[in-house]
Amino acid sequence: MNEVSLNGDSHIEAIPTIKQKALRINLNKNIYGTFAEIGAGQETARQFFRVGGASGTIAKAMSAYDKSFSDDIYGIENDERYVTQNRLKKMLKHETSLIEKRIKRKNQPNKMFFCYANTVATVDFAKKYNGHGWVGIRFQIDPKQKYNEIILHVRFKENTASQQQETLGVLGTNLIYSAFYHFSTPRKIIKYLYDHLNSDQIEIDTVNLSGPIFKDVDNRILSLELVKNGMTDAVLFGPEGNNLLPAAALYKKNILALRGRFRPVTKVNEEMYLNSLEMFLNERHVDKKDTVVIFEITMIDLTNDGEIDEKDFMDRAKLLGSLGETVLITNFKEYYRLVEYFSLYTKKKIGLTMGVNNLVRIFDPKYYTHLSGGILEAFGKLFFKKMKIYLYPELNDKEEIINSDNLKVHPRMKELYKFLKFNGKVVDLDKYNLNSLKIYSHEVLAKIKENSKGWESVLPKAVASKIKKFNLFGYNK
C-alpha cells in the first residue's frame, strides 16, 4: 500500500505547521471521521474547526465528560477506571462502528473513515499529580480494508491544565496527520508526533501499531525508537512482543531486575536468575503473584561502535520473549536511576541481580560527579529501605572466587560498603556451578557465529534450541 489513495500527496520534507496539517486533512475529500475526547476539552477537534473546511472532515465531535453518560455509551470498565487503554479501544471501536452504520458506503465509496479519541487526566489543582492519558486513532487507508490503529500512552510534564490541553491538541493533530501521510514509514510516525513539541512538554512511553498496513511492523522496534529519540527513558514489552504500560505492569509490584547484554542468555544468566528469584521470593512480604521479573538492557549495551544493530536487538528480544520474559530497554547508565524509575510505580521490595564488576562500579565516585550530592545522593536513591542487591561471584586471574566478602571497592567507599553489607543490602548468591564462572558471553557469541562444536553446552537447553530454530546471533547450519 502506498500513498496514492491519498490523492498522490508526496512527503513534504519541511515541517508543516499545525494549522497546515489540519487544513491539509480538511481539504482531503476522502478523509472523514469522528473526534471523541474526554478529560482535556476538545483540543484536537478545535485545531480542525479553526482552520476552516472542517465540515468535509468531521462527522461528529463529542466529549462524554459525565461518567454516567460515558458508561452508557462505552460500557462500564471492570476496574471502574476511565483513563485506560481498554477504555480508549472501546471508544475507537464504538465510534467507527457508528460512522459505518450512519453513512452508507454506496453513497461514499471513496471515504476513508477514522476515529480519533483520547481519554486523559490533566494536572490536578494541588499539582501533586501531573496527569497522563491514552490517545489513539482507528483509520482506513483503503475503504475496502479493515481498520488500522495507532495507540499511545502519554505523560504530561507541564504545570497547568491549559498548557497540557494545548499540548494534547498539537499531539492529536500530529497523530492524525502522520496516520494518513506517513503510514508507510512507521518510524516517521513516531518521529513526527513531536512536531512543534518537545520532551519537556510530554513523554510518550508506550506505542502500539496494528492493522493490515502495519502487519510487518514489530512494536519492539518502535519502542526502541522512543528511547533512542529521547521521547522516554524506558520502554517495557512483554513476551509476545507487545508494548506494555510501565505504570500498569509495575504498579504495586515487587520487582526483581537483571541487567545484562543477554547476547545470548548463558548458564551464568540462568543461575543468576533462578537463584536470586528463589531468594527474593523468600523475603518477607514478597508473594510470587505480586512479583515481576524484569530483564533490563541499556541503550549502551545495545550499541556497537555507537550504532544500534536492530537485527541484534531483535535477536535478543525474540530470545527473551520466547523464554517468557519481560524486557525493559532504558537510558539508565547508573543503577540508582533504574531504582528511582521503579520507585515511581511501587513502594514494595526491589531486588537487583548483578555480578561483582557491576557492584564495584557502583562504589566508584567518578560515576557520580554530575550530581551535586555526589555518590551519597546516588546512594540515597539506590539503597532505599526496601532494596537489596543479589551478588553473583566471579573468578579472578588466579581463579579465586570473589564475592561480597573479599571484593575491593574504592578506598574511600570501604566503610560505606561495610555498613551496607552489614545491614543486609548486599547478599551473595551461593548456588552456582564453578564451571559457569568461566563462561564469557563474547566467546560464546563468536562460537555460535562460527558454529564451533560444543557451544550449546554453556547455554540453557531451551536457549540453544531457540537459537537454532530462529537462526539467532548469526547462527547458520
Image (cartoon, rainbow, N blue to C red):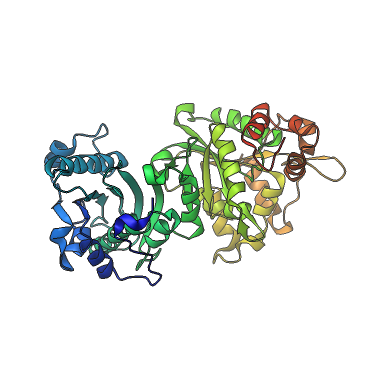
What is the total number of numbered labels drawn onto the structure image? 0
| Whole-percent x, y for residue 30 in the image | 22, 55
- Choose between 332 and 35: the one closer to the eye: 35
- Choose between 460 and 431: the one closer to the eye: 460
Q: Quick check: 157 above or below 102?
A: below
| Whole-percent x, y for residue 101 in the image | 14, 39
Residue that appears at 70% across and 59% down: 412
- Choose between 167 and 380: the one closer to the eye: 167
Q: Quick check: 258 above or below 27?
A: above
| Whole-percent x, y for residue 408 in the image | 76, 50
The quadrant where residue 72 appears: top left
Residue that appears at 57% across and 31% down: 323
Q: Would residue 257 be found to the left or right of residue 201 on screen?
A: right
Q: Is residue 181 visible?
A: yes
Q: Would residue 134 be found to the left or right of residue 415 on screen?
A: left
Q: Would residue 410 be found to the left or right of residue 317 on screen?
A: right
Q: Is residue 156 visible?
A: no
| Whole-percent x, y for residue 169 in the image | 25, 61
Q: Quadrant of the C terminus?
A: top right
- Choose between 317 and 17: the one closer to the eye: 17
Q: Quick check: 48 above or below 88?
A: below
